[in-house]
Amino acid sequence: MNDSAPAGAGPTGPAELAAALRATGYLADDGLATATYLAMQMNRPLFCEGEPGTGKTALAQALAQTLDAPLIRLQCHDGIDAAQALYDWDFPRQLLHLRTLEATTGTGGALDADAVEHSLYDERFLLARPILRALRTSPSVLLIDEIDRADDEFEAFLLEVLTEHAVTIPELGEIRAQTPPIVVLTSNRTREVHDALKRRCLYLWLEHPSIEREIEILHSRLPEVPERLAAAVARAVQKLRNSDLIKPPGVAETLDWARALQLIGARHLDPESAARTLGAVLKYREDADRVHKQLDTLLAS
Amino acid sequence: MPAVEQLDADTLLTGLVGFTEVLRTAGVPVTGDRVAAFVEALDTLDVTDREQAYWAGRLTLCADPDDVLRYDLAFPAWFEPSQGRRATNRDERPPAPPKLAALVPGREGSGDDDTDDGPQIKAAATGTEVLRNRDLAELSPAEREHLRRLMTLLRPEPPTRASRRKHRALRGVPDPQQTLRTALRNQGELSSIRRRNASRRPRKVVLLIDVSGSMEPYADALMRFAHVFVRRAPRSVEAFTLGTRLTRITRELRQRDPERALGAAGKAIPDWSGGTRLGEVLKAFVDRWGRRGAARRAVVVVFSDGWERGGTELLGEQIEQLSRLAHRLVWVNPHAGKDGYSPVQGGIVAALPHLDDLLAGHSLDTLEKLLKVVRDA
């Protein structure tokens, strides 16, 4: 149980981890703290799914800060492959190196093929991409962002790396992580991720925070924003989420809005200041039109 | 927070196994390795703390938000039965008991055993060509059975799109990496230029099937059609039913056996042959799935008679949104194939300006035509 964790191995329970995260300005609820704690203890990737703006990416950032470990980020996209995620060889430099060898051995001397090849596939020509970097940097936090954008071939490839915590480079041999990196995978659910991948992860479904927590988040992230303004922004955002919008605002939008209001020098959230800064929260013309008409009801407390 | 009672390890383990069994019945796909992870998680946490026990299970046994919903209902029911069902913070209800009306084979007295409809099938077999053009709603039980078999022979092909990933090819853009790699093998001599070209990948297909009362005669056949399609391309085809609410049935339809797949899908659909609020349900699809990606650049096929009781303004708006997201939007209306049909129902009129195709879907033949349209999209 709790006391089985080695000394100095970080937090000894979800509560302690939550406190550590709080110190970085990230407010984790019970579920999130438990999930993160388990991911660290069980050496399993944490699969975070939820609406955009519920703090999936921010969790990885806060975690890295808490553990004082580097955050290594891999942004997934359509068509991403192992060479972009793992490693590649720097071909132009290898070629240059080869030409140099030829030039320096002069016209008479023949090149020893084995030696040449050995020198070509040297560590210095290896371009480490995020996953390899994460395996070689320990401890580290590896964020695999928006895995739902990658293809299923890529998922299958990840499966191997995430279970073995090792990769084999034919020319160099196996590279194994001393301490497995803490892996956070995020998905916006644009596509269903393969069950085989999910099975190896802890699954965390994130929802928008409650109004109390959102006010707390505003306080901790933007201490310079007056308390009354922060509370008014959080209240208005909650209402926006419950009204019928194409894109309901996430926590990132709440923070943007509060910051925008503060920048234009607003002390209160009134129809005039709200109308001027609405672009920070609403990202669709239809939504903006709809809300513009009902600003008074939105701001009525 | 209330602590669960102190239990010894054996009782606890039995309890856990029972709990995972309950979850499985509730529709959460709990596998052996998930249970192992659950036990491991409990070992890491404080089991006697209700909150931690709850999260240990939720994080290891669930795999999507629907699972979480079922878990939230099962957990208090299992661990705190005396307290009754605790209110959850969601407004959705557990799936209602299945109504398998049109899904169970032989419902209309064609006989539950195969032997007694043997001759009928033989008779029907001679009329395969006729059957292809018959209205699905007017089939006799034997013809229906025969059609089911024909249905499994359909070979849907998902459309393709150019992939961003490039592959080695004879024509295409030069590939510096491959060219240099070859040169290295050749003592740095650049002998030929290697090229690469974009490959083709399957384009997403989304099937939205109206299962309201007015579509009931077609629902069984359309679900079978969806099953064949999902089975053919499980990674790129999504299927949903539209009734009083939206239900995703892709996962259920991925099972190989048609009867089991349809049975599971039927179980997942709480509003079988109920009413329809097409506009609202389409909105739910666009909001929850469509905009996030399921419908983006996909071929979206709506199977519905467009029967909308309320106003059609919302329906029109949603169809417009959908047509902007989708690569191609096809509406299949079983009535469109009948003599004297003209698109006058409110729903269809509102949707028509935004559709790429309006097709009939009342017979096997017309469903095959649909497959061609989808393939060439």
Image (cartoon, coloured by chain):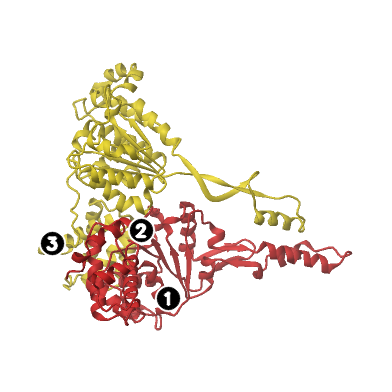
Which residue carries the number 1 mark? A64
Judge depth for marks 2 and 1 and give the one in front.
Answer: 1
Mark 3 vs 1: CB contact within 8 A = no
Chain that appears yellow: B
Where disc 1 sits, the SS reads helix
Which residue carries the number 3 mark? B81
Chain that appears red: A
Q: Amino acid at mark 1?
A: Ala
Q: Residue furthest right?
A: A108
User: Pointer 1 indicates a residue of which chain?
Assistant: A
**Of callouts 2 and 3, the N-terminal one:** 2
Judge depth for marks 2 and 3 and give the one in front.
Answer: 3
The answer to whether residue A25 shows anywhere in this view is yes
Q: Marks 3 and 1: same chain?
A: no
Task: Determine crowd level at label 3: few under 14, some 14-19, many 20+ residues with C-alpha closer than 10 A.
Answer: few
Distance of label 3 from label 1 (alpha carbons) = 41 Å
Which residue carries the number 2 mark? B33
